[in-house]
Amino acid sequence: MNFLNSYISIFNPKIKSKTFVILFVLTTAILLFAAFFFNRLDLEITLNDCIKNYQLSKIDSNEFSKIDTLIVGDSSGGNSINKKYFNELSGMTSENLCLTASFGIVGSLGIIKKAFKENSKIKNVIIIHAIDIWRRPFPKESILELFSIEEKFKYLYHSSIINYYLNLKEILWNLKYLLGISNPYWELDIKNDYIKQNKSKYSNGKKFKAGTNLNWIKLSDDKRRELKMLESYCSKNSINCIFLTGPLHSEMYENSTELLEYKARVIDPLFSKIKIYPQHVFQYENHKMGDSSDHIDVKHKNESTRDYFDQIKADLIY
């Protein structure tokens, strides 16, 4: 028994086939339009929506034309660099546009492209990603949300693009948000210019689990692809791009010697057109760490800012 016969037998035995087809097409069209509408409405339903819109708003501001140095990356960079203190140390005018690890390296590239579209005079781009970024899959949504329509079709299958814009789940997600059923549990920390950290921090007494390490991380083919995209853009546009690894809890660092050796042997040699600092990862003691093993507590953000500045100051273009 087909779908039409099933519908007629259950709901309305008098409905005609032509009427059913019209109703079905009309309902489908309305649902797809609603899905597209909510997608373009771009409400801050997720943490990624929140930080993405916050950082993009900086690019759209009138002050962005004065920026000469960009800081991009994930939460390890968002929590590590205080742009105001970086400006004091460097004498530059910087902006921290870090997203989250979910956006990947290609997400940082998307932010860089948007930034240069608004301000082509930027001299330096500092990219900071946590060391575990290398295991993550290719973030298609970064392409869909941060790249031009031409680039979307260049890097993704047509089906991925259609599914993104016409995802019926958008209706449910947005309705739950608007009705207050699934309100976000995060908030921005405007004073510290990034997502507010959880109260459960190492600096607040959170215990580091003995033996925890990152030795299981291995380079994914997706990240090779993303790095090539980033290096190609930096090289083609003659941008001074500097890639840095986010900080680590000192015990995590000590437990992850296999990963650090793997990074030096396998990952670092992949860089050919971007400046990196082989084998160098900043480590901080328990009382200086925040709500993650790669998040500095905001109280020590200036310290990490100085450490990173001292590392790269000789390679900055003034």
Image (cartoon, rainbow, N blue to C red):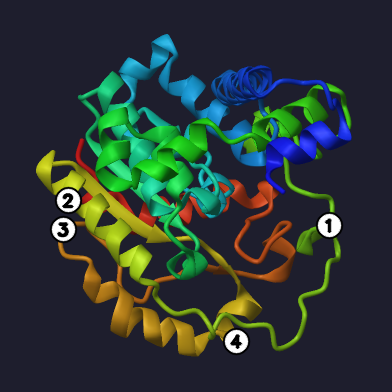
Residue type at mark 2: give it. Answer: Ser
Count residues near mark 1 (Cα–Cα under 10 Å), then give few for <14, some for 14-19, many for 20+: few
Give the camera-side residue of 215 and 125: 215
Choose mark 1 or mark 2, whichever is in front.
2
Secondary structure beneath label 3: loop
Q: How many marks?
A: 4
Q: Quick one: label 2 or label 3, which is nearer the N terminus?
A: 2
One can see residue 6 in this view: yes
Q: Quick one: label 3 or label 1, which is nearer the N terminus?
A: 1
Residue type at mark 3: give it. Answer: Lys
> Residue at horizontal 36%, vertical 64%?
223
Task: Tell me the residue that label 2 is attached to.
Answer: 232
Q: Quadrant of the C terminus?
A: top left
Task: Tell me the residue that label 4 is attached to.
Answer: 255
* Residue 175, image x, y percentages: 78, 26
Secondary structure beneath label 4: helix
* 3D distance between C-alphas at marks 1 and 2: 40 Å
Q: Pointers 3 and 1 in contact (CB under 8 A)? A: no
Task: Tell me the residue that label 3 is attached to.
Answer: 273
Secondary structure beneath label 1: loop
> Residue at horizontal 30%, vertical 50%?
313
* Residue 273, image x, y percentages: 15, 58
Task: Tell me the residue that label 1 is attached to.
Answer: 200
Q: Pointers 2 and 3 in contact (CB under 8 A)? A: yes
* 3D distance between C-alphas at marks 2 and 3: 8 Å
